[in-house]
Amino acid sequence: MNVFDKILVCTSLLCFAGNIRAQTAAGVPVFKIVTEDSSVRFAVKASVAIEGTFDKWEATLTYPSTDAEAGVLDVKIHADSVNTGSGMKDDKLKGKDFFNAKDDPYITFHSTKVVQTGPTAFDVQGNFTIRGVSKPETLTLTITGKGMGVGEIKGTMAFDRKEFGMNSGIPFIRIADRVEVSVDLKGKRVSGPPLVFKQ
């Protein structure tokens, strides 16, 4: 085989591989989470209400196929963007006794398994990391807009703060151990076919 033939074969293989990638990308749903219309919130029962949101975070929802249970949800929260409406509470939560935002700047959730539990309900199992400590947790989700290409994902998750090393309190405030997290994500399908759900 001469040099020209080798170049021709290599070019053909590259084109073939490119076509496979294009077909694969076109055959799966691609979603975008619209963060400006979405929110991530938390609440802790306490003698003085402690609840708030995070002003800076990102989320992705990735599908390798049209199977609704095949999705992978990733949420990355900037711990120092906590906003309770109180500077004193925010500073305490950012500190080493709670989020330790200086040394562990991100709070993350990476899903490992999605199970459809109802027509519009899902249990999303995954690894939740805060303060550098990772533990398995489950996010319970409901969706709206099924099959429409635009919809809303609402979910809740609860965890024990002491299991993640947050053992301290706030002076003069009694704080429960259970922390409840809620997400309200607006999403849209920007390309690809619709998801296929269990009937």
Image (cartoon, helix red, strand yellow):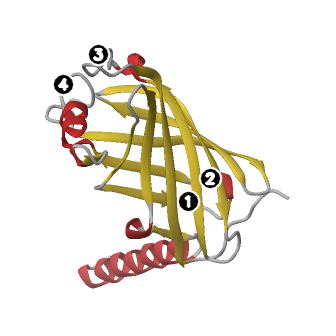
Specify the quadrant that holds the C terminus: bottom right
Q: Nearer the viewer, mark 1 or mark 4?
A: 4
Mark 1 surroundings: few (<14), some (14-19) or many (≥20) residues within 10 A: some
Tell me the SS state at disc 1. Answer: loop
- Give the class, few, some or many, for how many residues have Cα within 10 Å of label 3's Cα (few <14, many ≥20): few
> Is the C-beta separation of discs 4 and 3 under 8 Å?
no
* x, y percent for residue 196: 73, 65
- Residue matched to label 2: 70
Asked which secondary structure carries label 2, the reply is helix
The amino acid sitting under disc 4 is: Lys
Residue drawn at point x = 49 percent, y = 27 percent: 159
Q: CA distance from mark 4 to mark 3?
A: 10 Å
Mark closer to the chain start, 4 or 2: 2
Query: Residue 79 location, x and y as percent?
Result: 26, 42
State the CA–CA distance, disc 4 to disc 2.
37 Å
At mark 4, the secondary structure is loop
Camera-nearest residue between 110 and 140 = 140
In percent of width and height, residue 152 lies at 58, 65
Give the image location of residue 124, x and y in percent.
Answer: 60, 42
